Image (spheres, helix red, strand yellow):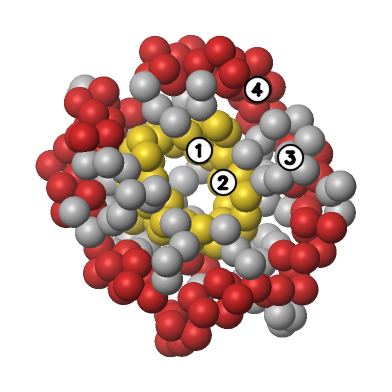
Amino acid sequence: MKFELMASMMCADFGNLEREVKELEEAGIDSFHIDIMDGRYVQNFAMSLNDMKCIRKLTDKPMDVHLMVEHPINTINLFTRNLRKGDTIYIHPEAEYHPSTTIQRIIDAGLTPGIAINPGTSVEQVKMLLRIVKKVLVMSVNPGNAAQIFLPYVREKYDELLVLKEDMNFDIYWDGACGADKIKEYAPLGVKGFVLGTTLLFGKGKPYRETLESVRNMIV
């Protein structure tokens, strides 16, 4: 069974960022997940445009850029012009007055459009946007910080989206508190990819290759 594993780079060692990227690439990571935070939409600052540009230069793997910023329409061009075809940009619909306009900017730039859904946002609230995006990043924790616990009521959201995804032509991705147990349960159901952070990948004192191979081998 094929599914994608993405490295949450806000959890990486920034003192050795180039080494981290190369080790993850050699270990078989599928893409690099970049969390951009503005301190306004979420009460934290994480990665920056320059961090994204640096990682983009270090690897040929796809990048998934998660914009946790207010009104991304105002800065979207800064990101689109520094990414490549095959890269993804997610926006939060609640952060924009007219999210479909921002999504169209992403499409026009030749990138893959996505939306991120907060734990408190219902599928019904974003249902019309599901027909114009290719990826849906479901937050199983509140956005803004790493090392949070899984919010079990989000399971219902995954169940709703799994019913809709074939007809509306989008893929589902898991972000937040992602352990091996969640991948084992949801990859067979149809969740396409999983963002790996401190719960499973980073700070565990073992090679990234060992972790990624263990995850892939547990699902046949």
* Residue type for callout 2: Asp
Q: Residue at x 55, y 32 (%)?
A: 171
Q: Residue at x 38, y 50 (%)?
A: 87
User: Sequence order check: which comes first, mark 3 or mark 2?
Assistant: 2
* Residue type for callout 1: Leu
- Confirm whether residue 172 shows in the render: yes
* Residue type for callout 3: Ala
* Contact, mark 3 vs mark 2 (Cβ under 8 Å): no
* Contact, mark 1 vs mark 2 (Cβ under 8 Å): yes
Q: Element at badge 4? A: helix
User: Sequence order check: which comes first, mark 1 or mark 2?
Assistant: 1
Residue on which disc 4 sits = 162
Of the pair 20 and 3, the residue shown nearer to us: 3
Residue on which disc 1 sits = 137
Question: Quadrant location of the N terminus?
Answer: top right
Measured as percent of width and height from the top left, residue 49 is found at 25, 63
Q: Which mark is residue 175?
A: 2
